[in-house]
Image: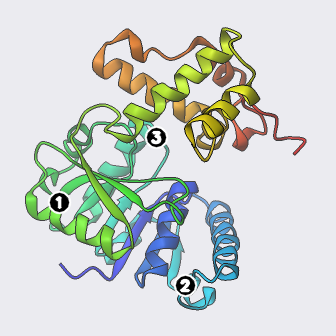
Amino acid sequence: MDIKIIGVVGAGTMGGGIAQVAAATGFDVLLHDVTPELLDRSLKIMDKSLSKLAEKGKLKEDKGAILGRIKTTTSLGDFKAVDFVVEAVYEDFEVKKRVLQELDKILAPELILASNTSSISITRLAALTSRPGRFMGMHFMNPVPLMTLVELIKGIATTPETYAMVKALSEKMGKVTAEANDFPGFIANRVLMPMINEAVFCLMEGVGTPEAIDTVMKLGMNHPMGPLALADLIGLDVCLYIMEVIHDGYQDSKYRPCPLLKKYVAAGYLGRKSGRGFYNYAQA
């Protein structure tokens, strides 16, 4: 299959980043979200991101040419014209179910459909469609334009041809791939989220302040960002959802979400996007 136009569903942090990288590596992109306002916001974020990359000499062409390859739409019906689709909507099974089932009716039968899910079973998502053999996980890392990894996950029915094509596409987009089997949280979040969750337990139990916990992990373990600051960046609601997926999948108490994480989400303290999480961003 000759992939020239990549469709991206969801213009949030991940979807916008995927669209930017695809366009920067020469693909035409059709980016979808439910309102023009969300799409305009995503384009502005991409413009700012590309400007920073240009200042650092990391763009191979003018940012105008890159942005010119990105078209936007609020209608999934327009995806009839694309050659490959990445679903990057909110990390919630019911939300993804609605989008994937609608896409499945629109897309040509031979088209590959990938999900950027960071934790939900690829086999379960694939079973929602009529193309389980041409469905797989394509989990980009945040921020997509800066992080080189793409975690590739095959469902039980994913064909070798589908995997090979998605791997080749990822590499053409300048990414390094790692294959993960279809278990809750895959590799990335099965390791990362329990670490974040344990950091929240440390905070809840008074082992240290957010600043102390993050400083230990940054300076002691050479992490670029502390786990609590990273949770704020990801979104505490997303972290909680992923921990619940892992806990439900394994039924192991070591994956139980920290009560303080639940309390913060219930209070609306979701991190950077809400202005407050483990740190206060409203005054920043």
In the image shown, does 94 or 166 lie closer to the viewer?
A: 166
The tag on residue 66 is: 2
Disc 1 crowd rating (10 Å Cα; few below 14, some 14-19, many 20+) is many
Q: Given contact means CB atoms under 8 Å apart, are the residues at marks 3 and 1 in contact?
A: no
Disc 2 crowd rating (10 Å Cα; few below 14, some 14-19, many 20+) is many
Q: Position of residue 268 (x, y in %)?
A: 71, 27
Mark in front: 3 vs 2: 2
Give above or below for 117 relative to 52.
above
Q: Badge 3 is on which residue?
A: 91
Q: Check disc 2 and report its element: helix, strand or loop.
A: helix
Q: Given contact means CB atoms under 8 Å apart, are the residues at marks 3 and 2 in contact?
A: no
Amino acid type, label 2: Ile
Measured Cα–Cα span from mark 2 to mark 1 = 27 Å
Measured Cα–Cα span from mark 3 to mark 2 = 28 Å
Give above or below for 76 relative to 6.
above
Q: Residue at x 47, y 79 (%)?
A: 23
- Sequence-wise, the earlier of marks 2 and 1 is 2
Q: Given contact means CB atoms under 8 Å apart, are the residues at marks 2 and 1 in contact?
A: no
Q: Position of residue 126 (x, y in %)?
A: 22, 46
Q: Position of residue 255 (x, y in %)?
A: 41, 18
Q: Check disc 1 and report its element: helix, strand or loop.
A: helix
Residue 14 seen: yes
The tag on residue 163 is: 1
In the image, taking residue 209 as reference, residue 2 lies left or right, namely: left
Image quadrant occupied by the C terminus: top right
